[in-house]
């Protein structure tokens, strides 16, 4: 008996069910943390869209116009996201997935494999958009007192809206894989996507959207939205989706645009299926070929590391770690996005207009110095969880090489620590010093923040290295390792540590600056307390650093048991 | 050169290795035979320092693995059953890194790397990423690494898996040459032909215990077979000792 194509999705359904039943260590904690964050974001989205729609309702025709444009703009943003997500997901589901060998070797018609894989691609590529859209549309619906028909139309609109861009993405993937080897296509796409995201972050910030919040610039808002409209916009599914929902909000039904959405969605499935029947197997076959890999030899790196005063073992471990990191696009390319965020972060301090409140500017500047320290701590924790925490796990199944060699786990883990410390320290120290310079904070605070960043870097990189050794996930993707139980536990501890550090460094520093503004020296008791706080900050950093490393080394040594 | 004394490994209530004692002399190739799940890989992984024994002692070149692991490992080369290597390094880089772990550095390492790559017929692949290698090439690269630091003893888990006949012939020749130079080799294998052809002595392990040990001829006699010198004979002995009578039932089922 030939089963229908959903039968091919059974392994994923059963795997998910088994995973949920078995429940790995930390699954509950992870579910609580991520579920809580997700729920909070959804609530904020719901409240935000409700508030905004209610506000717009006060402007009658202009409000309707802005809501209509806003919906179209929202869908337009998701359209590009879905298309890109579709390309990346299709690459994985259609060409790189391990179970394809089993499926394609079985007597299954290409059409059935296509249907199953396409359904999976649509689901995987669009769930995030759906999770984001649902609370937003619910907020809009509630603010406009919409009836059940609006919610039914929302579902009726979202389904074809997700199918169309993912189908377009799948066709692009088919063409790409038939042109480049699949693994190289993945690298190219990943890089393009991150450059796109980084560019978008910088562009959106440099538009300075905060200026649009000023009352006197209301006409600018309409101009701003109007510039987003172009002659091709009405030809896009995002416009059709926006129009269908807007009509439904007003109690009507836009058959033209709903029809356009559904016919295009069904038509695109037919086109992608035909393209798949024509090009899928040749693409898959190419994806299996192992062409001569192109890469850089990185000889300069060899020479640079050889010039460092390191032992043979440390030198070789460092060369190995750096080369593997630099040759794996999925690893280093995320630094581009991080770089963009740092640029935006510093730019924010550059354009901060504190002179508008002259009598407060001195105080606010110094408060910002501590906000800046907290932000630097969070950047540090984020970089550490993404790049330092997985340092042991990325050894993967090759870890036997280290364990069978005559080096101690202490040497190995300390090598990982120093490799992680240098970039984290340099990055966060630069961000802190530059931001404080832009702000023009008190020199004493500048110095204190710089020293605090050094202490925090040692502690957080030590914590990440040690916890990464205690909770390794060999064979998992570094991004998966960061989101594992150990990664979440690290982030919680890191945030607690940052809070403690800000309290221990912030209180005595602000006391000192406050007394100096008053022209008074701190009293002896205050001086003693301040010294105590600084000593406590240094001691707790050293304790977190060294104890984490020690527990990590012990965990690695016990691993052989 | 390799000495195991009452080695035990337990996983909870299950005993994977149960009081194994073994000596491999310098220059000896010692075969380690047994059915799947008998405890061969567990034993070899304990010798390599990848698993901690529940009890017992392991000596490599006179170094106790429990008290002087670095000394023991420095004298040992390990070839695992599956060649997992860093995919993003070239063959040359991987060997230089591996040499570095054993303290080889400077000009010495460059020459030695090329020597080993040529020996295992991987010379022209020195500057290619490991990710483009076939399984057999990776297996040979791991062997290059195992012999790179001139170990006094080598532990090999299933050396012939994934190798073509030419590769298998090459490995046999290399192992023989190494043993002639005094290197002790402990080799687990399922291929009785290989054991018969290469091993000076063979130990048969079953359910974590050594049930027979000796030269191939001695094992044949233990199994009650005649000294005919073919692999078929050793297979019969192996099946007899490890309870392979069940094989007869296969015919009935099929």
Image (cartoon, coloured by chain):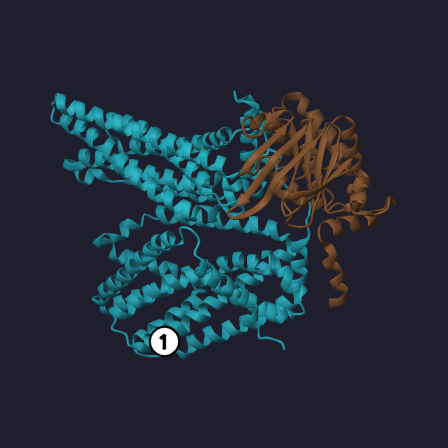
Task: Name the residue rendered at 35%, 72% in the picture.
Answer: A245
Residue A250 location in percent, x, y? 29, 76
Residue B187 point in image, percent of width and height: 71, 38
Q: Is residue A189 above or below residue A101?
A: above
Q: Can residue A293 be seen in this view?
A: no
Residue A26 place in picture, x, y as percent: 40, 51
Please indicate whether residue A458 sits to the left or right of residue A398 in the image. left
Supply the letter of whichever chain is brown: B
Mark 1 neighbour density, 10 Å: few (under 14) some (14–19) many (20 or more)? few
Chain A, which colour?
cyan
Judge by depth and name the residue closer to the eye, B8 or B174: B8
Provide the chain ID for the residue under circle 1: A
Name the foreground residue: A152 vs B208: B208
Identify the residue position indicated by label 1 in the image. A152
**Whether residue B225 is situated above or below residue B144 in the rendered picture:** below
* Extreme residue in the right direction: B228
Q: In which quarter of the image is residue B93?
A: top right
Of the 4 image quadrants, the one containing the N terminus of chain A is bottom right
Q: How many labels does the image show?
A: 1
Residue located 34% across and 40% down the image: A494
Pick whichever, B44 or A102, lies toward us. Answer: B44
Q: Position of residue B95 (x, y in %)?
A: 65, 32
- Find numbered disc 1 in the image and state the secondary structure of the residue it sits on: helix
């Amino acid at each position: 008996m030939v089963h229908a194509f959903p039968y091919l999705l059974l392994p994923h359904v059963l795997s998910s069910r088994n995973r949920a039943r078995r429940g790995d260590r930390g699954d509950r904690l992870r579910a609580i943390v991520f579920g809580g964050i997700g729920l909070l974001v959804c609530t904020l989205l719901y409240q935000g869209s409700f508030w905004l729609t209610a506000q717009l309702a006060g402007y009658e025709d202009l409000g309707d116009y802005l809501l209509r444009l806003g919906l179209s703009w929202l869908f337009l943003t998701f359209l590009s996201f879905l298309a890109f997500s579709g390309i990346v997901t299709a690459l994985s589901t259609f060409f790189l997935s391990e179970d394809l060998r089993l499926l394609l070797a079985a007597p299954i018609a290409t059409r059935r494999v296509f249907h199953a894989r396409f359904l999976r691609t649509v689901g995987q590529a669009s769930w995030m958009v759906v999770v984001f859209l649902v609370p937003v549309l619910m907020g809009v619906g509630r603010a406009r007192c919409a009836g059940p028909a609006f919610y039914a139309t929302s579902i009726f609109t979202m389904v074809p809206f997700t199918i169309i861009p993912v189908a377009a993405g799948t066709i692009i993937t088919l063409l790409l894989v038939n042109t480049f080897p699949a693994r190289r296509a993945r690298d190219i796409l990943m890089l393009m996507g991150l450059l796109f995201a980084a560019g978008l972050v910088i562009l959106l910030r440099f538009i300075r959207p905060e200026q649009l919040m000023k009352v006197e610039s209301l006409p600018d808002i309409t101009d701003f939205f109007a510039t987003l409209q172009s002659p091709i916009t009405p030809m896009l599914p995002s416009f059709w989706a926006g129009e269908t929902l807007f009509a439904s909000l007003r109690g009507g039904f836009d058959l033209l645009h709903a029809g356009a959405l559904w016919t295009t969605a069904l038509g695109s499935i037919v086109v992608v299926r035909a393209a798949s029947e024509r090009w899928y197997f040749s693409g898959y076959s190419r994806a299996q070929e192992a062409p001569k890999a192109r890469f850089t030899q990185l000889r300069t790196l060899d020479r640079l590391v050889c010039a460092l005063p390191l032992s043979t073992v440390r030198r070789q471990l460092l060369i190995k770690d750096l080369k593997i990191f630099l040759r794996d696009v999925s690893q280093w390319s995320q630094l581009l996005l991080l770089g963009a965020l740092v640029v935006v972060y510093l730019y924010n301090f550059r354009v901060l207009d504190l002179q508008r409140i002259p009598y407060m500017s001195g105080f606010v500047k110094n408060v910002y110095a501590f906000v800046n320290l907290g932000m630097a701590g969070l950047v540090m924790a984020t970089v550490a969880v993404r790049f330092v925490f997985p340092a042991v796990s990325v050894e993967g199944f090759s870890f036997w090489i280290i364990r069978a060699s005559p080096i101690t786990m202490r040497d190995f883990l300390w090598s990982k620590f120093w490799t992680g410390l240098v970039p984290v320290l340099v990055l966060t120290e630069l961000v802190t010093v530059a931001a404080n310079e832009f702000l023009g904070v008190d020199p004493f605070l500048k110095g204190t923040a710089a020293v605090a960043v050094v202490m925090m870097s040692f502690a957080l990189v030590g914590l990440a290295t040690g916890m990464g050794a205690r909770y390794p996930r060999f064979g998992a993707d570094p991004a998966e390792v960061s989101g594992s139980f150990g990664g979440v536990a690290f982030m919680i501890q890191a945030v607690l540590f940052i809070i403690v550090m800000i309290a221990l460094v912030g209180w005595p520093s602000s006391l000192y600056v406050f007394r100096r503004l008053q022209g008074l020296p701190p009293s002896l008791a205050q001086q003693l307390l301040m010294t105590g706080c600084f000593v406590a900050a240094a001691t707790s950093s050293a304790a977190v650093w060294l104890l984490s490393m020690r527990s990590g080394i012990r965990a690695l040594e016990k691993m052989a048991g | 050169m390799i000495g195991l004394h009452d080695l035990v490994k337990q996983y909870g209530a299950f005993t994977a290795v149960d009081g194994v004692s073994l000596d491999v002399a310098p220059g000896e190739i010692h075969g380690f035979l047994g059915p799947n799940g008998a405890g061969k890989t567990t034993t070899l992984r304990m010798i390599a320092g990848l698993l901690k024994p529940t009890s017992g002692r392991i000596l490599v070149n006179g170094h106790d693995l429990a008290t002087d692991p670095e000394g023991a490992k420095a004298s040992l080369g390990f070839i695992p059953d599956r060649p997992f290597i860093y995919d993003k390094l070239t063959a040359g880089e991987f060997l230089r890194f591996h040499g570095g772990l054993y303290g080889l550095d400077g000009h010495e390492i460059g020459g030695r790397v090329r020597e080993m790559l040529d020996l295992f017929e991987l010379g022209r692949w020195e500057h290619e990423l490991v990710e483009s290698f076939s399984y057999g090439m990776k297996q040979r690269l791991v062997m290059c690494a195992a012999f790179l630091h001139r170990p006094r003893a080598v532990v090999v888990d299933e050396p012939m898996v994934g190798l073509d006949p030419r590769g298998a012939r090459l490995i046999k020749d290399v192992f023989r040459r190494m043993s002639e130079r005094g290197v002790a080799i402990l080799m687990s294998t399922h291929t009785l032909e290989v054991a018969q052809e290469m091993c000076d002595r063979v130990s048969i392990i079953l359910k974590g215990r050594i049930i027979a040990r000796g030269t191939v001829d001695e094992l044949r006699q233990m199994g009650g077979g005649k000294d005919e010198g073919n692999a078929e004979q050793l297979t019969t002995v192996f099946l007899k000792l490890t309870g392979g009578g069940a094989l007869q039932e296969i015919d009935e089922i099929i």
